Image (cartoon, rainbow, N blue to C red):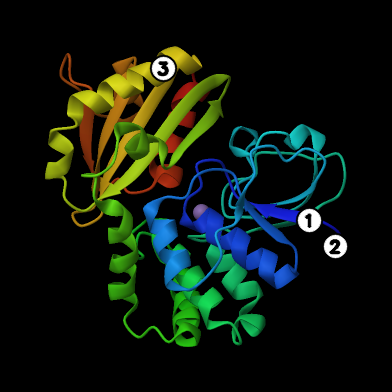
Amino acid sequence: MEKVIVIGHKSPDTDSVVSAVALAELMRCKAARAGELNKETEFVLNRFNLPVPELVTDISGNKVFLVDHNEQTQIVDGIENAEIVGVIDHHKIQFSTSKPVYLHFEPVGSTASIIGKLYIGQLENNPNLAGALLGALLSDTVIFKSPTTTDEDKLIAGNLAKIAGITDIQAFGLEVKKANASLKDKTIEQIVKADYKDFDMAGNSVGIGQTEVVDMSELVEKYNDIVSYLDGIMQKDGHRIVFFAATDIVNEGSELFFSGDKTIVEKAFGVSIPEGKRSIYIPGLMSRKKQIVPPLEEYFKHQ
Ligand SMILES: [Mn+2]
């Protein structure tokens, strides 16, 4: 393939970046990223001696292979002047092309799982790439705790761990997660926007950020700042509603902050929120894709 650039979504997470790096190396093309790296991704690339892919903010004029996303709002700018040649993803299909393209979608816990399975033969000789893919898999599945996790993810993780020489998958997963979990040294923007995605739901623009937290007490002092930051996004971007989920990966639940009409939150999630309160704790809520997006889409569909 000539000059294909492999790239993940805006506000990239570890799955997006590592999948791009791995696929580019395996297909012998170029990896890029559509935004700044978070600390967790930095940790994984570092740990396995992998290069940081080049930052690309406008993809115009290139052939592009998308990994870990396919929704218009999440694709790097300039895509309307580029040619999509392929997509490997584990999200719902939300796009169309005028030409035939290579598509590989699977309902598994990470894009890294798909790449790890497809290329397991080649990965045998590349323990660093296998280790990084394992890190991305464990990140996206929240060390297998997310409801998006499948038996196949666990199987692939085992194979990748063997190649990478990692004996304790749980301990390695926690190491990966902890690299990004402390809120202490981060600005509100870094906390909310590190993993933030815009969605179009029946003509309504919905923004949803998510972060994983190991120590929820760090959240308390940031409550007001988070709420006013969300209000700022609401005003600037003209959304119908904006969310931020702080997900407790130890106790398995999320504090769901919002800016917008609280009846949307109440109806979509079947909760009741006291007047003036701008967040609600939802036990068991771990996954944006499986537990936040679907109830909201259901709500807006019937509006
Ligand atoms: Mn992913």
Q: Which residue is mark 3?
A: 234
The residue carrying mark 1 has its beta carbon less than 8 Å from ligand 1: no
Q: Which residue is mark 1?
A: 4
Earlier along the polypeptide chain: callout 2 or callout 3?
Answer: 2
Question: Type of residue at label 1?
Answer: Val
Name the secondary structure under disc 2.
loop
Residue 145 position (above or below residue 213): below
Callout 3 environment at 10 Å: few (<14), some (14 to 19), or many (20+)?
A: many
Question: Measured from the top left, where is residue 180 in percent x and y?
Answer: 32, 54
Question: Measured from the top left, where is residue 119 in percent x and y?
Answer: 65, 76
68 to the left or right of 251: right
Question: Measured from the top left, where is residue 141 in percent x and y?
Answer: 40, 60
Between 270 and 176, which is closer to the camera in this rendering?
176
Callout 1 environment at 10 Å: few (<14), some (14 to 19), or many (20+)?
A: many
Between 112 and 8, which is closer to the camera in this rendering?
8
Earlier along the polypeptide chain: callout 1 or callout 3?
Answer: 1
Of tags 1 and 3, the one toward the viewer is 1
